[in-house]
Image: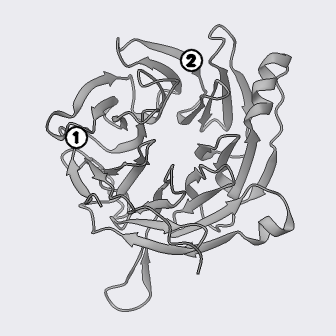
């Protein structure tokens, strides 16, 4: 069995990391979006000379995803703009502009659909196959904080504990029909009492997980039957005993990511730890040694061989003069053969 190894990418981003994305098709190219207004491209297979290129934006980059191949990416920024980035030529094309910062961006290669979510309480739906087409704006009932796509669905987690689930095929049909109204496939109330920080979809297309600022994770299934809904559960995590012995210090769970092969998932928190969980068996598989700072973002490579972990100071200590400069790092864990494999139900 191959041993697990861990190393740091150099040079790291110059300020806090907002998002990480691995290229499709088992590529070792990794993108990192940062508050220093840069998008960083790395090759994680070359630890000593990993930085390929940087792409300067007009404002902090809040999210990034790949397009159809490893040379195409989409970014969402503090300047309200959703950009397409040609990673070979560094050419940037504006896809749409929101009325407030664009917080999240996800792409479905199977449907040719790019979805951006903004703090102006809207989604922009882009038909990537028809670049000349006008994006469709969909109003949301709350401010979106996290978005994730499964093979057939998009999950949008908002303020007010609202979760909207949209069907990707319905969105694709919307483009061809010429209509501009989209109702959610389902609207749910979050299983978590506090603000949603992250959402991730199961690669099996069966359901999703959400995490909150209050050290909890919930796992739910899409199927709207009594049996499936009875399976949903939530659990406490990323907490540490208080130094005075009175209760726990509770940290936000900033990052969630499902393993693309085994279907287990990783969580990363403000307590500077990463844990691996078996969603089916409802148990923790592993907790890694503490990292130097808060976990801001995580992503598995598409073949499941690597886990990229973005580390930078969080806001847990309430810093007013925040800076991630010199304290930000991206760690790559090359996973052992069975490291992320579930143990099965008891």
Q: Viewed as shown, does residue 136 lie left or right of 202?
A: right
Which corner quadrant holds the C terminus? bottom right
Residue at 85% over, 68% down: 226
Q: Is residue 237 visible?
A: no
Residue at 82% over, 33% down: 182
Image: 330 above or below 214: above
Mark 1 secondary-structure assignment? loop
Quick one: 318 or 285, which is closer to the camera?
285
In the picture of the structure, the residue carrying the numbered disc 1 is: 12
The quadrant in which residue 87 appears is: top left
Residue 320: percent from left, percent from top: 33, 53
Mark 2 secondary-structure assignment? strand
Toward the left, the furthest residue is: 48
Question: Callout 2: few (<14), some (14-19), or many (20+) C-alpha neighbours within 10 Å?
Answer: many
Res. 163 mark: none
Residue 225: percent from left, percent from top: 85, 62
Quick one: 303 or 254, which is closer to the camera?
303
Q: Is residue 179 visible?
A: yes
Image: 82 above or below 166: above
The quadrant in which residue 175 appears is: top right
Residue at 66% over, 46% down: 156
Quick one: 233 or 260, which is closer to the camera?
260
In the picture of the structure, the residue carrying the numbered disc 2 is: 95
- CB under 8 Å between discs 2 and 1: no
Residue at 85% over, 21% down: 179
Mark 2 or mark 1: which comes first in sequence? 1
């Amino acid at each position: 069995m191959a041993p697990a190894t861990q190393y740091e990418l150099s040079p790291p981003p110059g300020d806090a990391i907002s998002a990480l994305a691995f290229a499709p098709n088992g590529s070792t190219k990794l993108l990192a979006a940062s508050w220093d207004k840069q998008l960083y491209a790395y090759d994680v297979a070359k630890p000593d000379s990993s930085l390929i290129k940087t792409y300067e934006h007009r404002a902090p980059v809040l999210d990034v995803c790949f397009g159809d191949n490893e040379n195409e990416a989409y970014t969402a920024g503090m300047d309200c703009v959703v950009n397409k980035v040609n990673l070979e030529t560094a050419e940037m094309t504006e896809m749409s502009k929101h009325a407030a910062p664009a917080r999240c961006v996800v792409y479905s290669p199977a449907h040719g659909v790019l979805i951006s979510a903004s703090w102006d309480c809207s989604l922009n739906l882009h038909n990537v196959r028809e670049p000349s087409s006008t994006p469709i704006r969909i109003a949301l009932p709350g401010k979106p904080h996290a978005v994730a796509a499964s093979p057939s669905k998009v999950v949008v987690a908002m303020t007010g504990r609202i979760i909207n689930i949209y069907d990707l095929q319905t969105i694709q049909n919307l483009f061809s029909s010429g209509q501009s109204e989209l109702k959610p496939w389902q609207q749910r109330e979050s299983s978590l009492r506090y603000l949603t920080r992250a959402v991730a979809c199961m690669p099996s297309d069966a359901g999703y997980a959400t995490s909150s600022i209050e050290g909890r994770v919930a796992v739910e299934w899409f199927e709207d039957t009594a049996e499936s809904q009875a399976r949903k559960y939530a659990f406490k995590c990323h907490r540490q005993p208080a130094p005075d012995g009175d209760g726990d210090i509770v940290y936000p769970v900033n990052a969630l990511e499902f393993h693309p092969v085994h279907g287990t998932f990783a969580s990363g928190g403000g307590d500077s730890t990463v844990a691996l969980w078996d969603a089916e068996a409802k148990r923790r598989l592993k907790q890694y040694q503490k990292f130097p700072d808060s976990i801001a973002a995580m992503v598995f490579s598409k073949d499941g061989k690597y886990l990229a972990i973005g580390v930078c100071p969080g806001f847990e200590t309430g810093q007013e003069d925040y800076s991630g400069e010199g304290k930000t790092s991206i760690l790559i864990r090359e996973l052992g053969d069975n490291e992320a494999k579930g143990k099965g139900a008891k």
